[in-house]
Amino acid sequence: MLKKICFISALLLVLAAVLYSCKKENTSLPAEPQKAIDGSWKIVQALRNGTDLTSRFDFSKFRIVFSDSSYTLTNPVPFLVTKNGHWSFDDPQYPAKVFFRAENGVSATSSVNYPVVKGIRNIIISFSPGCVSNSYTYTLEKE
Protein backbone atom coordinates (compact mmCIF):
# COMPACT_ATOMS: atom_id res chain seq x y z
CA MET A 1 0.00 0.00 0.00
CA LEU A 2 2.85 2.36 0.85
CA LYS A 3 4.35 1.72 -2.59
CA LYS A 4 1.05 2.63 -4.20
CA ILE A 5 0.80 5.91 -2.23
CA CYS A 6 4.41 6.81 -3.11
CA PHE A 7 3.77 6.01 -6.78
CA ILE A 8 0.57 8.12 -6.89
CA SER A 9 2.31 10.98 -5.05
CA ALA A 10 5.25 10.88 -7.47
CA LEU A 11 2.86 10.77 -10.43
CA LEU A 12 0.95 13.79 -9.11
CA LEU A 13 4.21 15.71 -8.59
CA VAL A 14 5.35 14.95 -12.16
CA LEU A 15 1.92 15.90 -13.52
CA ALA A 16 1.95 19.17 -11.54
CA ALA A 17 5.47 19.97 -12.77
CA VAL A 18 4.44 19.35 -16.39
CA LEU A 19 1.29 21.47 -16.13
CA TYR A 20 3.01 24.42 -14.42
CA SER A 21 6.05 24.36 -16.70
CA CYS A 22 3.99 25.04 -19.84
CA LYS A 23 3.97 28.64 -20.98
CA LYS A 24 1.87 30.18 -23.68
CA GLU A 25 3.86 30.81 -26.81
CA ASN A 26 3.57 34.20 -28.44
CA THR A 27 2.38 33.22 -31.91
CA SER A 28 1.68 36.70 -33.25
CA LEU A 29 4.05 38.08 -35.85
CA PRO A 30 5.77 41.38 -35.20
CA ALA A 31 4.23 44.30 -37.05
CA GLU A 32 5.87 45.15 -40.35
CA PRO A 33 7.26 48.69 -40.18
CA GLN A 34 6.09 51.29 -42.65
CA LYS A 35 8.43 51.74 -45.59
CA ALA A 36 10.48 54.88 -44.99
CA ILE A 37 11.70 56.51 -48.19
CA ASP A 38 12.54 59.97 -46.85
CA GLY A 39 15.75 61.32 -48.33
CA SER A 40 17.46 61.92 -51.64
CA TRP A 41 17.38 59.17 -54.29
CA LYS A 42 19.36 58.82 -57.52
CA ILE A 43 18.85 56.60 -60.57
CA VAL A 44 21.35 53.73 -60.67
CA GLN A 45 19.66 51.82 -63.51
CA ALA A 46 17.20 52.87 -66.19
CA LEU A 47 15.48 50.43 -68.53
CA ARG A 48 13.17 51.21 -71.44
CA ASN A 49 11.30 48.21 -72.76
CA GLY A 50 13.94 46.02 -71.10
CA THR A 51 16.90 47.80 -72.74
CA ASP A 52 19.42 49.37 -70.37
CA LEU A 53 19.63 53.14 -70.95
CA THR A 54 21.84 53.90 -67.97
CA SER A 55 25.01 54.48 -70.01
CA ARG A 56 23.20 56.13 -72.96
CA PHE A 57 21.70 59.04 -71.04
CA ASP A 58 23.08 61.19 -68.23
CA PHE A 59 20.95 60.30 -65.21
CA SER A 60 23.69 61.33 -62.76
CA LYS A 61 22.21 64.75 -61.93
CA PHE A 62 18.62 63.59 -61.44
CA ARG A 63 17.43 63.45 -57.85
CA ILE A 64 14.08 62.90 -56.26
CA VAL A 65 13.86 63.92 -52.62
CA PHE A 66 11.05 62.41 -50.57
CA SER A 67 10.09 64.04 -47.29
CA ASP A 68 6.96 63.20 -45.32
CA SER A 69 4.35 63.15 -48.08
CA SER A 70 6.02 65.52 -50.56
CA TYR A 71 8.66 65.08 -53.23
CA THR A 72 11.02 67.43 -55.06
CA LEU A 73 12.57 66.75 -58.48
CA THR A 74 16.03 68.03 -59.43
CA ASN A 75 17.29 67.92 -63.05
CA PRO A 76 14.23 66.05 -64.37
CA VAL A 77 14.48 63.14 -66.80
CA PRO A 78 11.60 61.26 -68.45
CA PHE A 79 9.54 60.48 -65.36
CA LEU A 80 5.95 60.02 -64.23
CA VAL A 81 5.58 63.68 -63.32
CA THR A 82 7.52 66.82 -64.22
CA LYS A 83 6.66 69.05 -61.26
CA ASN A 84 7.18 68.78 -57.51
CA GLY A 85 4.22 67.58 -55.46
CA HIS A 86 2.94 64.94 -53.07
CA TRP A 87 3.24 61.18 -52.96
CA SER A 88 1.66 58.26 -51.10
CA PHE A 89 1.75 54.46 -51.03
CA ASP A 90 -1.32 52.28 -51.51
CA ASP A 91 -0.26 50.45 -48.32
CA PRO A 92 2.44 51.95 -46.05
CA GLN A 93 3.60 48.55 -44.77
CA TYR A 94 3.39 46.47 -47.97
CA PRO A 95 3.44 48.98 -50.85
CA ALA A 96 2.71 47.75 -54.37
CA LYS A 97 1.92 51.15 -55.89
CA VAL A 98 3.10 54.71 -55.38
CA PHE A 99 0.89 57.66 -56.25
CA PHE A 100 2.32 61.01 -57.38
CA ARG A 101 0.24 64.21 -57.43
CA ALA A 102 2.16 67.12 -58.95
CA GLU A 103 1.61 70.78 -58.07
CA ASN A 104 0.15 71.34 -61.55
CA GLY A 105 -2.61 68.80 -60.82
CA VAL A 106 -1.15 65.94 -62.86
CA SER A 107 -1.48 62.58 -61.10
CA ALA A 108 0.40 59.40 -61.90
CA THR A 109 0.62 55.90 -60.47
CA SER A 110 3.49 53.44 -60.64
CA SER A 111 4.15 49.95 -59.43
CA VAL A 112 6.87 49.92 -56.80
CA ASN A 113 9.27 47.35 -55.37
CA TYR A 114 11.41 47.95 -52.33
CA PRO A 115 14.33 45.45 -52.41
CA VAL A 116 17.64 45.46 -50.59
CA VAL A 117 20.49 44.89 -53.07
CA LYS A 118 24.01 44.29 -51.73
CA GLY A 119 22.89 45.65 -48.37
CA ILE A 120 21.53 48.87 -49.87
CA ARG A 121 17.83 49.78 -49.98
CA ASN A 122 16.52 50.39 -53.51
CA ILE A 123 13.21 51.50 -54.96
CA ILE A 124 12.17 50.13 -58.34
CA ILE A 125 9.55 52.22 -60.13
CA SER A 126 7.92 51.06 -63.37
CA PHE A 127 5.78 53.32 -65.52
CA SER A 128 4.65 54.15 -69.03
CA PRO A 129 4.73 57.93 -69.73
CA GLY A 130 1.91 58.38 -72.21
CA CYS A 131 2.89 55.90 -74.92
CA VAL A 132 1.75 52.42 -73.95
CA SER A 133 4.44 50.78 -76.10
CA ASN A 134 7.21 52.39 -74.00
CA SER A 135 7.68 51.29 -70.43
CA TYR A 136 10.41 52.56 -68.14
CA THR A 137 11.84 50.91 -65.05
CA TYR A 138 14.05 53.03 -62.83
CA THR A 139 16.07 51.60 -59.97
CA LEU A 140 16.64 54.31 -57.38
CA GLU A 141 19.25 54.16 -54.66
CA LYS A 142 19.26 56.33 -51.56
CA GLU A 143 22.19 58.71 -51.22
Image (spheres, grey):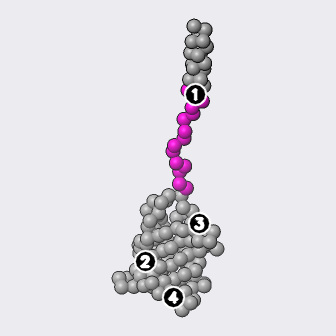
Distance Cα–Cα, label 2 vs label 1? 60 Å
Distance Cα–Cα, label 4 vs label 1? 66 Å
Q: What residue type is labelled 3?
A: Asp
The residue beneath circle 2 is 127
Above or below, 92 against 43 in this view is above
Secondary structure beneath label 3: loop
Q: Give the range drawn in magenta.
A: 18-33
The residue beneath circle 4 is 53
Q: Main secondary structure of the magenta part?
A: loop
Whether label 3 touches label 2, CB < 8 Å: no
The residue beneath circle 1 is 18
- Looking at the image, is mark 4 or mark 1 earlier in the sequence? 1
Residue drawn 59% across the image and 66% down it: 38
Secondary structure beneath label 2: strand
Q: What residue type is labelled 1?
A: Val
How far across and down, in percent of the image, does residue 127 sit? 43, 77
Q: Nearer the viewer, mark 3 or mark 4?
A: 4
- Looking at the image, is mark 3 or mark 2 earlier in the sequence? 3
Dot 4 alpha-carbon crowd within 10 angstroms: few under 14, some 14 to 19, many 20 or more:
some
Residue 38's disc is 3
Q: Quadrant for the C terminus, please.
A: bottom right
